[in-house]
Amino acid sequence: MAYTTLLSFCLCLLVLFHGCFAQIDLVTNHHQDQPWGQPQQPQPRHQSQCQLQNLNALQPKHRFRSEAGETEFWDQNEEQFQCAGVAFLRHKIQRKGLLLPSFTSAPMLFYVEQGEGIHGAVFPGCPETYQSQSQQNIQDRPQRDQHQKLRRLKEGDVVALPAGVAHWIFNNGRSQLVLVALVDVGNDANQLDENFRKFFLAGNPQGGVVRGGQSRDRNQRQSRTQRGEREEEESQESGGNNVLSGFRDNLLAQAFGIDTRLARKLQNERDNRGAIVRMEHEFEWPEEGQRRQGREEEGEEEREPKWQRRQESQEEGSEEDEREERGRGRRSGNGLEETFCSMRLKHRTPASSADVFNPRGGRITTVNSFNLPILQYLQLSAERGVLYNNAIYAPHWNMNAHSIVYITRGNGRIQIVSENGEAIFDEQVERGQVITVPQNHAVVKKAGRRGFEWIAFKTNANAKISQIAGRVSIMRGLPVDVLANSFGISREEAMRLKHNRQEVSVFSPRQGSQQ
Amino acid sequence: MAYTTLLSFCLCLLVLFHGCFAQIDLVTNHHQDQPWGQPQQPQPRHQSQCQLQNLNALQPKHRFRSEAGETEFWDQNEEQFQCAGVAFLRHKIQRKGLLLPSFTSAPMLFYVEQGEGIHGAVFPGCPETYQSQSQQNIQDRPQRDQHQKLRRLKEGDVVALPAGVAHWIFNNGRSQLVLVALVDVGNDANQLDENFRKFFLAGNPQGGVVRGGQSRDRNQRQSRTQRGEREEEESQESGGNNVLSGFRDNLLAQAFGIDTRLARKLQNERDNRGAIVRMEHEFEWPEEGQRRQGREEEGEEEREPKWQRRQESQEEGSEEDEREERGRGRRSGNGLEETFCSMRLKHRTPASSADVFNPRGGRITTVNSFNLPILQYLQLSAERGVLYNNAIYAPHWNMNAHSIVYITRGNGRIQIVSENGEAIFDEQVERGQVITVPQNHAVVKKAGRRGFEWIAFKTNANAKISQIAGRVSIMRGLPVDVLANSFGISREEAMRLKHNRQEVSVFSPRQGSQQ
Amino acid sequence: MAYTTLLSFCLCLLVLFHGCFAQIDLVTNHHQDQPWGQPQQPQPRHQSQCQLQNLNALQPKHRFRSEAGETEFWDQNEEQFQCAGVAFLRHKIQRKGLLLPSFTSAPMLFYVEQGEGIHGAVFPGCPETYQSQSQQNIQDRPQRDQHQKLRRLKEGDVVALPAGVAHWIFNNGRSQLVLVALVDVGNDANQLDENFRKFFLAGNPQGGVVRGGQSRDRNQRQSRTQRGEREEEESQESGGNNVLSGFRDNLLAQAFGIDTRLARKLQNERDNRGAIVRMEHEFEWPEEGQRRQGREEEGEEEREPKWQRRQESQEEGSEEDEREERGRGRRSGNGLEETFCSMRLKHRTPASSADVFNPRGGRITTVNSFNLPILQYLQLSAERGVLYNNAIYAPHWNMNAHSIVYITRGNGRIQIVSENGEAIFDEQVERGQVITVPQNHAVVKKAGRRGFEWIAFKTNANAKISQIAGRVSIMRGLPVDVLANSFGISREEAMRLKHNRQEVSVFSPRQGSQQ
């Protein structure tokens, strides 16, 4: 009976350790043959992060409600995110909501799915070039406040944030502000482990927001996540969750030159507003200003009424400037130089700036280190895709990146194929779902009847695709005889394969055979 | 009896988890002292990939026969490959054999051990600069086909291939074409895990070829590899193994603008030719052409009769050009720029271009990012060594790279020494064997009576060695007093140590004590 | 009873594998529900290296006595070192002691805590530009010896050493020479695993010195380290521990062109002097020379009496030169170019060159790739801090690096806060202790009554901090309204937070509220 028990235990272990040591059952059968202490059997590869056999389109798993919005996390433990080394989250910020200042140990790229807002990032050593006057309390004493540059957010913007840089976001629009973000925890810039971590500088965010939905006590987390599909909120933990709350109040008081009472306020221990707080006073972020320059097409903000610029920001530098910036940046070779003060963090993706456009098919807009140079340091890029009804995005593979795709509108079918010719994903996807296309895996997207839009985050500053069909495809590059012999088809058929689809990347829905 | 069972199970686990947790037996003895849930004992380092105590010269382990050749894989699970993070394989392509178009998620370097061939790589966005006319069917309709650049392969060539770039190889010579290849699965460019993966664009290669000899079902693989030394072939799996076979045929038809019948042909499900197929028609790859320019010494191909070039290829650019290319490439900083279109992938290693030559000893030819700039992106380099009978390659260590050595001719003795002064390898090696010299481990090679030749692949774009003996050795750089006191020898002996061997890297077999 | 046994075994496993599979107990409970062979449950993240909940200030754990000094290692298995991917050690070299020539597979940064010495590093291919005449045996035959450049060490120097470069150190001063060193085993340049390895070229160092205190036989090590706090010395192992001792003596003799008797001497098998040997002959490293140029303030050595320079060393190049060097280095893009021959390895940190100085608070001196360009290749930098009594180093976080802090003088309090606002360290530290501040974790240092000094090694060539208080802090960069709403304080309080502390990084001990 001990044997039976042992056997079932053995089997349970087999399941458990499958990732690491799938062949336990076999090897244990002849353990007596092993010389002690120095097993000569080759060890199996210790880790199989990307042995993906069946992907799923994913919804967020954890949701945390705050006073003025909510934060949702996709499950970091999903195989596809483990393979790609990324975390994925979504902020929904209500009107007048402020996402508290925070930073992460990994570079981040976010996309404004909906709404408008103000984004502020603080780089150490960069000048406080913006002035603002507060409307509120103006009768008391009108203070002039100086701070670092702000940028306006609106739907379609892609914003890059290097590791360790603090930022905050305020919804000054009329509707909800929705942001989806990729946090590249597998990036070299993240020297901590691959667990998501958000360091808040103020307030008392939920513990789950700080750790990306993960509980620090793993047992506790596991039991919860096995219970239900998605749990809400979380009981407030004792002690504040901002980084100041860990310091002794008297040391904090000394450091800031303030009294201990105020220092204790900074620690926000009894604050229950969460990560997104409501701006208390009826604070007005004005909509119209003195200077209008209509630089919208430049991909940059334009109107800053009371947020006047002291210096001419270089954010709208010409392309010349950008190229120079990149050059300078590279020479110094690290991610946090003085040039960061004048680097753009944001890129717009309007229809007018599409890189690929097919009036019958749709368009593709790419944001990479060529049009947003800071991405060189982040090693991330993005692709915004719009397919009209029933159009096809050319089958291709990502040569040098994973692609993490978030559906922003409509629906469509995505097929993903692994190295052994198996479809590891072949499903309809719709708004709000995330699916990872691993590096080198072949993928094709076809829009549904209502069209299909997505934002894809890619783990390379200049992610490249290699198309399988279309005018710039691999088929065009291969000699027709190689094609014919490889596929075992006639030369005429091979010629059709090479030339029938003349469009570049976005294919119109129906196409008669040409030529 | 339960205890006995448990003990033997315990012991079997000990063997199993040796890589991770070698001290299980000790720690389990006092587990009661541990507070549950939060073990305060420092965890051992989780992984000891390079704890190499005893290396072996390796032969291939898996062989897969195809219609017109065979593919052999060395065992990826070997400690030395796990430590170096590489996979190693050999293609033997018969006359008129075509290695099907494929790509891998890791950079690759291959060496032409024997024979001649044609190599085509397809970079997305690069122009179709080559024209060819097919001999076959010329009566039907002489089609002009355009495709990307080709390069001729012959014995001694080193060819570099970035991750995700598709390529194919055709044997147009008179004998078998033999290629050995290093796939640097541990390279940063590979964002998947460290398992070998080959993505075929056509045909129906064996599952084992796709996965480097690994079966996806690990249990199955393990049982097989423990049975015998090397198993042959593999039963054909159901479904095609090329990436197109994973797509739905109707979607494929739409994407290519072809009919569904042809789309199904592309999926090659019933193709049993394997990874290397015979060119069906008596296809002639001509040997003589119009333009002869005798650029052989330039390290590049010369004769392309019917494969006429439309544009002047920049492949034979002067050294000036190459330097410029490298400059340009670096500035953009990623591995897949437009400049790739004009970058050389191939470098020849004839005797005339050796970097080190000793008429009584042999020669060393280095292929690194200085003479093959694309290697900057691959972070790989190669060294071809030729030792005459009984000559010695200076004892040295690889400062910044692993060196994976494949013996191409003759035989010799190799000694490799680890940090604690133990010889982890001291054996005769011969043609066809592979041995890894890990970074910083001291190594010496001595040719046998028939001479000794090898190709070494190194995991750095500019791998450097530091010699222990010879004119540019560490001994020359150390003050004689430091030498004398370190070794506990006299100053005169130290002077002999510094100066007796005047040769640079390749030492003639016998040498009287000089000076 | 078998069940009981099994249960306790289960529990013991739970402890063991906690790092990997913390939820074993939970999952095993329902293993019957799992389909065999393909567990659909998401696997937990395989590794949690940086889940630091409670740090300790660390003393060295292993000490190895040699003939003329001792070497101490901190415990590599400590969580904080595992997280940072570093090893830490200290050499104490007695007067006339010579640390034997050796190299490591990882870049190293060391700091001269006390004493004076001579440092020699040997780069392959660099010229032997220094001449020396030995005093001893001058009657026999006055030999002129040529060797590579030397540099003088004195207290406060920071010295960088790339992976794989051999170096040696001689104490020619009047007191003990004490060096602390960070070995960045997690650096990309280290292609072996993250175990510390030191390869000695001569002598017979203790096995523990070669492996950083780790025994190769892990069982043995484990039992020892659990026994006591710190064990001394180690029985001499059989066989020499230098890399030459692993070669066959006859092959060694052939390689050097020496006789076998001398070759055997090189293997030093019966040498029991350890890693630091006494220079046998009363060797004089002269203190005064012909050429004095008073370049001390340049941060470089000046007096080389009998170590005359043949060529003008470029080590004291102007800043222009340095910039050029860096440019050249980057263009070639690898860490071992010819330019290394003229690159400085050393940087002084005198009070006069501090980057931040507050006469009432102290000073901070930074050594990074801007003033020591070789650090660009090592991806390491250093910060020397001096706080006067009761002064405060501004609370901050390291944006892009871990910071490994060694206390060199005095004592002080350090607080470190993790992402969830918990103090993972809050203790008094004193001379000789090491504490790791992980990336992005907030930290504050306050000097004790006797002042407080440290050297911090950082895992980035240009480590940046982001301050939480002070004139260049995050608070200055945030709009006052964001501050007020984030902390739930009034605008007036927010203004105090922004402006009360006007000092930059080093805060004087007491400060009345300004403004």
Image: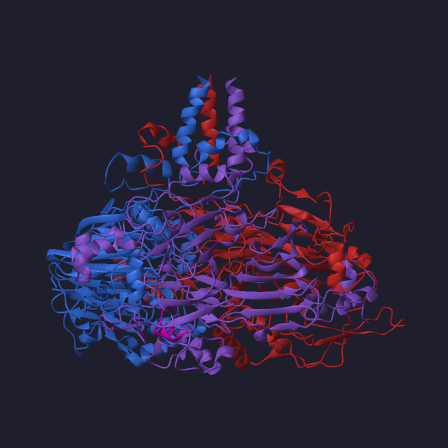
Chain colours: A purple, B red, C blue
Question: Per the image, is C110 magenta?
Answer: no
Residue sitting at 73 percent across and 50 percent down? B240
**Visible residue check, residue C192:** yes
Asked whether, in this view, residue C431 is left or right of residue A488, the answer is left
Q: Is residue B256 above or below residue A299?
A: above
Per the rendered image, the range of residues in magenta is: A334-343
Identify the residue at horizontal 54%, vertical 25% (top origin).
Answer: A7
Q: Position of residue A484 (x, y in %)?
A: 79, 63
Q: In front here: B281 or B42?
A: B42
Q: Is residue A183 left or right of residue A51?
A: left
Q: Position of residue A36 (x, y in %)?
A: 45, 32
Q: Which residue, as the protein is rendered here, is positioned at the far right?
A: B139
Q: Is residue A336 magenta?
A: yes
Kindly identify the residue that appears in the image at 23 percent across and 52 percent down: A247
Above or below for C304 versus A23? below
Vertical side of C38 occupied by B335: above or below: below
Residue B120, percent from left and from top:
68, 67
Quarter of the view holding residue B92: bottom right
Towards the viewer: C312 or B469:
C312
- Residue B447 visible? The answer is no
Tally of numbered discs = 0
Residue A406 picture location, percent across and down: 55, 58
Horizontal side, residue A240 vs residue B12: left or right: left
Closer-to-camera residue (B259/B420): B259
Looking at the rendered image, the quarter that the C terminus of chain A falls into is bottom right
Q: Residue furthest front?
A: A139
User: Which quadrant would residue A477 be assigned to in this image?
Assistant: bottom right
Q: Quadrant of residue B242?
A: bottom right
